[in-house]
């Protein structure tokens, strides 16, 4: 008998595609920013060329030239870098639907924060993506967009505000993934609405025998640089769901801000380095900010309810707790229809299994509230504290 879990295999395939496309897009983006920063005006350049670069790779030598606006004559074969970006976003959005929208009840909605329907939750999620792009685009086109420092500070602050707001509505993982999707949507919209159209206008002008408008290249370059700096925070958010100590910390928005700021600093360090300017203070600042954020993350605000620590928690209490909050998913045959098999292959139908998985349970249920998913079963802080005490007893 063939039993195919279509949703799970689809999720895996789309996630893999998203990963592959993301590597291609980020690789191309990082390469071209490096190339742009590494161009030098050595000796006599060809007419209209702003800089050149010689490189060796894979046993071959390469000679790159960058024109200030465009070459006097278009080549027959001109490569466009766009489908890497489009495929990354399309696969990411499909994954958002498969995991967080189809599975909204488990992965997106946290009724202890806001009791909303699946439809409302999905609409809020979609609206956040659209609103994020509109606000970002308006900022770029405003006078603020001409001042890179001011623009960056405002956009960064708005993203952190979005993180705070969304964590008041969704599960922490659901909120984080939407912040990542807001950034990713802005990045791909830059390609779709600005960078590629401006390049097409430049090509059309040349075909018509006209001089291309230099402002088109300036606007495209602005968005390309923005994408370069937003990449590392997006990658952080992509892996954040695997680390409850970040996503479900009481100050998760502050941790995201700290790590993202460190990522922006290190990206700026390398961008300057490729231009021939070394700024060790930037690298030191990034490392210091990273360590300071880790320190803040290690200060866990106590969520335990006051109780007599000497009171021994009976095994029967934990068995009942597992039955109420865990085994609907973590059972040999889950009653939760979202899971044809226990997540991670882990069942909590026996106390021995709970003891064997004590570290993960403490991390995701006691030290954070990632589990139960969306706190659908209404697990209380007192129950979490009781579970933590029982786990401590097992170590004695």
Image (cartoon, rainbow, N blue to C red):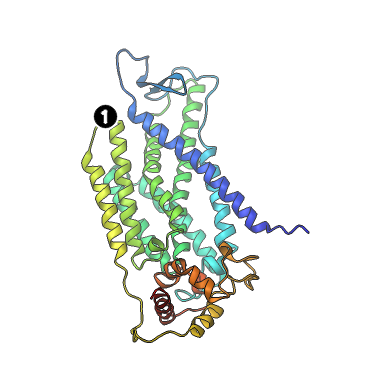
Residue found at the far right of this picture: 1
The image shows residue 168 at horizontal and vertical percentages of 41, 69
The image shows residue 260 at horizontal and vertical percentages of 34, 52
Q: Between 277 and 394, which is closer to the camera in this rendering?
A: 394
Task: Write down the quadrant of residue 214 in the picture.
Answer: top left
Tell me: residue 267, above or below residue 7.
above
Task: Write down the quadrant of residue 44 in the picture.
Answer: top left
Badge 1 marks a residue whose secondary structure is loop
Residue appearing at x 23%, y 47% in the figure: 285
Residue appearing at x 59%, y 58% in the figure: 98
**Residue 136 shows up from this direction:** yes
User: Which residue position holds label 1?
Assistant: 276
Residue appearing at x 43%, y 75% in the figure: 394
Tell me: residue 66, above or below residue 335.
above
The image shows residue 229 at horizontal and vertical percentages of 36, 44
Q: Between 318 and 253, which is closer to the camera in this rendering?
A: 318
Residue appearing at x 41%, y 32% in the figure: 32
Tell me: residue 94, above or below residue 193.
below
**With 216 as the anchor, is 333 left or right in this view?**
right
Looking at the figure, which quarter contains the C terminus?
A: bottom left
Residue found at the far top of this picture: 44
Q: Between 392 and 174, which is closer to the camera in this rendering?
A: 392
**With 372 as the anchor, is 63 left or right in this view?**
left
Label 1, residues with CA under 10 Å away: few <14, some 14-19, many ≥20? few
Looking at the figure, which quarter contains the N terminus?
A: bottom right
The image shows residue 27 at horizontal and vertical percentages of 45, 37
Residue found at the far left of this picture: 281
**Residue 215 shows up from this direction:** no
């Amino acid at each position: 008998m063939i039993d195919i879990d279509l949703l799970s295999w689809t999720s895996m395939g789309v996630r893999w595609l998203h990963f592959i496309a993301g590597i291609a897009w980020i690789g191309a983006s990082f390469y071209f920013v490096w190339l742009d920063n590494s161009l030098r005006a050595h000796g006599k350049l060809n007419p209209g060329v702003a800089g050149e670069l010689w490189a060796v790779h894979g046993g071959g030598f390469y000679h790159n030239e960058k024109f200030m606006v465009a070459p006097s004559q278009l080549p027959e074969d001109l490569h466009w870098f766009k489908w890497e970006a489009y495929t990354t976003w399309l696969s990411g959005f499909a994954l958002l639907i498969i995991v967080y929208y189809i599975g909204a009840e488990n992965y997106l909605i946290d009724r202890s924060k806001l009791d909303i329907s699946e439809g409302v939750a999905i609409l809020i999620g979609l609206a956040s993506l659209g609103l994020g792009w509109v606000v970002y685009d308006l900022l770029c086109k405003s006078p603020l967009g001409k001042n890179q420092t001011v623009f960056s500070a405002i956009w960064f602050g708005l993203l952190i505000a979005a993180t705070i707001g969304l964590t008041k509505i969704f599960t922490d993982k659901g909120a984080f993934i939407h912040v990542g999707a807001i950034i990713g949507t802005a990045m791909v919209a830059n390609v779709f609405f600005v960078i590629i159209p401006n390049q097409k206008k430049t090509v059309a002008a040349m075909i018509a025998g006209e001089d291309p408008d230099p402002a088109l290249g300036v606007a495209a370059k602005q968005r390309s640089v923005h994408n370069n700096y937003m990449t590392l925070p997006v990658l952080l958010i992509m892996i954040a769901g695997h680390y409850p100590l970040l996503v479900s910390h009481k100050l998760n928005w502050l941790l995201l801000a700290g790590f993202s700021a460190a990522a922006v600093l290190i990206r700026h360090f390398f961008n300057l380095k490729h231009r021939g300017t070394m700024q060790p203070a930037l690298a030191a600042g990034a490392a210091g900010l990273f360590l300071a954020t880790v320190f803040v993350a290690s200060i866990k605000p106590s969520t335990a309810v006051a109780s007599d620590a000497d009171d021994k928690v009976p095994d029967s209490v934990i068995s009942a707790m597992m039955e109420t909050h865990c085994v609907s998913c973590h059972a040999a045959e889950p009653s939760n229809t979202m899971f044809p098999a226990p997540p991670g292959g882990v069942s909590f139908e026996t106390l021995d299994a709970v003891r064997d998985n004590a570290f993960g349970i403490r991390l995701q249920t006691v030290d954070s509230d990632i589990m139960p998913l969306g706190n659908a079963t209404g697990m209380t802080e007192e129950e979490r504290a009781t579970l933590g005490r029982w786990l401590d007893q097992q170590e004695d």
